[in-house]
Amino acid sequence: MVALLTPTILVVVVAVGLMASFDADVLRRHLVDTTETTARVVADYSSADLAFGSRAESQAELSRFVQDARMLAVALYDARGDLFSSWARDVAPQPALEKRLSRAVERPAVHQTPAAIEVWMPVVQDEEHFGTAYVRASTAEIVVRQRAHLATLLLLGLLLAGLGVLVAFVAQRVVSQPILRLSAAAEHIALHRDYAARIPSGGTREIRTLTASLNGMLAAIEQHQRERDAAVAEAGRHADNLELRVRERTADLEASNRELEAFSYSVSHDLRAPLRAIQGFSRLLLEEHGRRLDDEGRDFVRRMAAAAERMDRLILDLLEYGRLGKKATEIEAIDLDAVVDDAVRHVGDLLAERRADVRIEHPLGRARGHHATLVQALVNLLSNAAKFVQEGVDPVVRVVATRPQPTLVRLAVNDNGIGIAREHHDRVFQLFERLHDSSRYAGTGVGLAIVKRAVERMGGRVGLESETGQGATFWIELPVA
């Protein structure tokens, strides 16, 4: 509290000091003006005495010019600077008047000392210099006023200091001590988290109001803590139940996976076995008994064999699509050039059969993914690029890599095929979606679904840019390695 009052006391003291200094300055300026006026009057009325050398008249008249008690001495000097006449008030101590001026006075001059103010005024009549008037005034009044101000300032400082001590004492009792108690209680509560504690009330009305608010807040926190503890306990019970349900669901999923694996085995062996038999017997029927059949019969057998072959490819694609959902894919840095080369080797026979021109713009860079999974996706894209072309057109396939963003690499497969209408771009990635009759373009409708699932398993994206009759560009985006 004393620290708070100290600036106020200093401001008041400085303000009073400035007022005292201003008052003394005003008094001094007024005294200078009065002394100059007196010197001017003496000079104006003394030109004749100096001109005619009337020392006695001048001596008598000087006393009449100094009615102001502050005037200490008046003197006239002739044109040569010698003392002509003078008058001095009978006060001590007072310096003696000069018998001869030490310098010529051509214009009014003022000299100020702590004890007196001196003015020299030239006596001029019709531009003729007759001498100099000299007036000395006392500054005792200013000194007395300054002492009075100093005494007032000292008294005011003592009063303000006493008031400050009194206010500090009262504030210590009424404000500081309750606040310190409040602070100590708050520190104890924060340190020990004892929200059941309450802060004792006391001090001013505002402090009592603050204490009541804090106690109310503590009560609310205590209630919230009880509710939170109860909620945590309830959440613990739910977590235990959830963990039990998760274990049960995990066991169910493991059982379902085992059943799915068993079903996949059955499909792979038991379901494909009759298809192989149909294919084998159809081939034997054409080879051994084809001559006994007419053209229509042989066509039926060929259609039957082709249908069995399509069914076999469809089963294989479905099995591969299902395995993608279960197969663990360890994401790591992979070389895209090696991936594309492996994919081209996998479909080398098809590309050669279709006389496809494959152009790979090396280097393709590196990405984060799974080598075998990405090879599988590219095999499907390269196969489609070689198959879906106009009759009589040799496929031209271009593989490039770009950076759509600094953190992504886009691997694109561009072809000169039949293209895909814009309204079908989303459909082609769905399972069993075919845009063309199987008799014209072979396929199962699963290949692009496998591509999409494989890329998503690696944390990437797949997309398509194409127009009907203008070829297609399928792209795969993966993080940069």
Image (tube, rainbow, N blue to C red):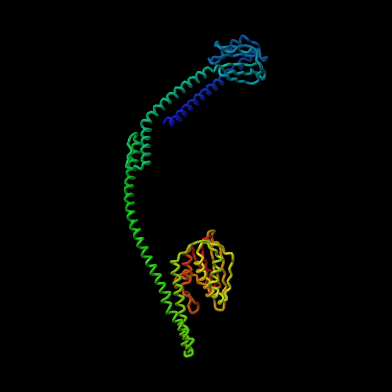
- Residue placed at 44% from the left, 23% from the top? 158
- Residue placed at 38% from the left, 34% from the top? 180
**As rendered, which of 13 and 251 lies closer to the eye?**
251
Tell me: 190 left or right of 341: left
**As rendered, which of 183 and 85 lies closer to the eye?**
183
Tell me: 252 left or right of 389: left
**As rendered, which of 200 and 362 lies closer to the eye?**
362
Q: Quadrant of residue 191?
A: top left
Assign the N terminus to one quadrant of the image: top left
* Vertical position of residue 359 compared to residue 122: above or below: below
* Vertical position of residue 25 compared to residue 289: above or below: above
Query: Residue 168 location, x and y as percent?
Result: 40, 29
Query: Residue 369 location, x and y as percent?
Result: 50, 63
- Residue placed at 58% from the left, 71% from the top? 358
Q: Quadrant of residue 391?
A: bottom right
- Residue placed at 34% from the left, 51% from the top? 232
Query: Residue 305 location, x and y as percent?
Result: 46, 82
In the rendered image, the residue lying farthest to the bottom is: 292
Q: How many marks?
A: 0
Query: Residue 104 location, x and y as percent?
Result: 66, 18
